[in-house]
Amino acid sequence: MNTGRTIFAQLMDLLPLAAFRRCVDRYRGDYKVQSFSCLDQFLCLAFAQLTYRESLRDLETCLRAHPRQLYHMGFRGGISRNNLAHANLQRDWRIYADFARVLIARARALYQDEPFGVELDQTVYAFDSTTIDLCLSLFPWAQFRRHKSAVKLHTLLDLRGSIPTAIYVTGGQVNDVRVLDQLALEAGAFYLLDRGYIDYRRLYLITQALAFFVTRAESNTRYRRCTWRWVDRSTGLRSDQTIRLTGPKSSRRYPAPLRRIHYFDAEKDLRLIFLSNNFQLEALTIAQLYRARWQVELFFRWIKQHLRLRSFYGTSENAVKTQVWVAISVYVLVAILKKQLRLDLSLHKILQILSVTIFEKSPISLVFSEYNERIPEPDPYIQLDLFNL
């Protein structure tokens, strides 16, 4: 007898299924499909992410252990390892990429007023990549080194809420700088880039798009100083200059003036040189902006530790990209749940609670309201006395 709905079903209620069906129809994902639809595939992979399943066989065993609850959890097709493997190989990964973007748009609307450590009205993005090592014999399409394969996740992260707004999955051999060409630049927004993304022709494109960037200067940058501004050295600032590049190639690729800020981090005994095309913000604010770029590193660490992204359920490029986008959808879905339920818990704790209560039939808000951070004191009256038997 079914009394109530499972936590998994209540979580999946947050999915905009009409938008999902549009994504499926766009790529004819359910064409000639009889029993195992794209929605079944998405639910299976989302369940695998939430419960840390190690493989497709592990996922199949876990779901088949609860046959009476699958229908009420939204599953309609037959769950089998072969069905999942075939779907991961054949169903277009762009279905799940487009659907993840729908969820991302909803999450960004919820987190648009979220603080991120710097008082700034403009949107601030951090762009970086992380590498996931793979076996060359199993993933030959992603060859990275002579004896190793890898995939890269190039991520544009909105610092308000740490929401990934764009992700590009490539083989490890793709240079990070080349992915900058795929960004849809937003006028007035700030883009925080690591030193590895310095390409003056591409940086000038950001300036022409009326957007701003902050990056670290290379040690061999050739320039001449045009003007300078007073700085408060007690804040760590050492100089704030307007410069022009003088290198034969750099001056041609970036003909406009740049702002060069020298900052000394006394805590780490580190000298940092920043380049930016913004001349309105305070120099210290620009230094603080670059420090906020560390959030994208924390995001990469989080998804690698708490989502199934270190190993994959299929070896084809389509299967890898499908798994990545479903994992991102789960991450964003948990972020939406946190905001809608107004939970004062980290995403990691929310994910942990969901993983152990996924089959429970109680209101999802009640599951989190019963969580208590304080470790209860043991009741001495329920302890056994070894010497009084």
Image (spheres, rainbow, N blue to C red):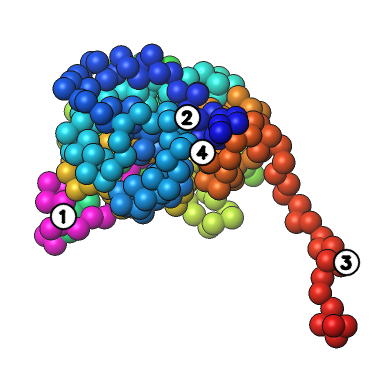
Image position, residue 173 (x, y; %): 17, 47
N-terminal of the two: label 3 or label 1? 1
Look at the image and tell me whether residue 365 can be seen. yes
**Quadrant housing the C terminus:** bottom right
Measured in 3D between alpha carbons, the distance from the residue under mark 4 to the one under mark 1, in whole angstroms, is 37 Å
Along the viewing direction, whichever of 301 and 327 lies nearer the viewer: 327
| Residue under numbered circle 2 | 72
Q: Amino acid at mark 3?
A: Tyr
Q: Nearer the viewer, residue 124 or 146?
A: 146
In the picture of the structure, the residue carrying the numbered disc 3 is 381
Q: Tell me which segment is drawn in magenta.
A: 127-147
Residue density around tag 1, few if under 14, some if 14–19, many if 20 or more, within 10 Å = few
Q: Which residue type does callout 4 highlight? A: Ala
Q: From the image, tell me which residue sits under label 4.
A: 292
Which residue is depicted at the point 84% across and 63% down? 379
The picture places residue 323, in percent across and down from the top left corner, at 31, 40
Label 3 to label 1, Cα distance in Å? 58 Å
Please identify the quarter of the rendering in which residue 54 is found: bottom left
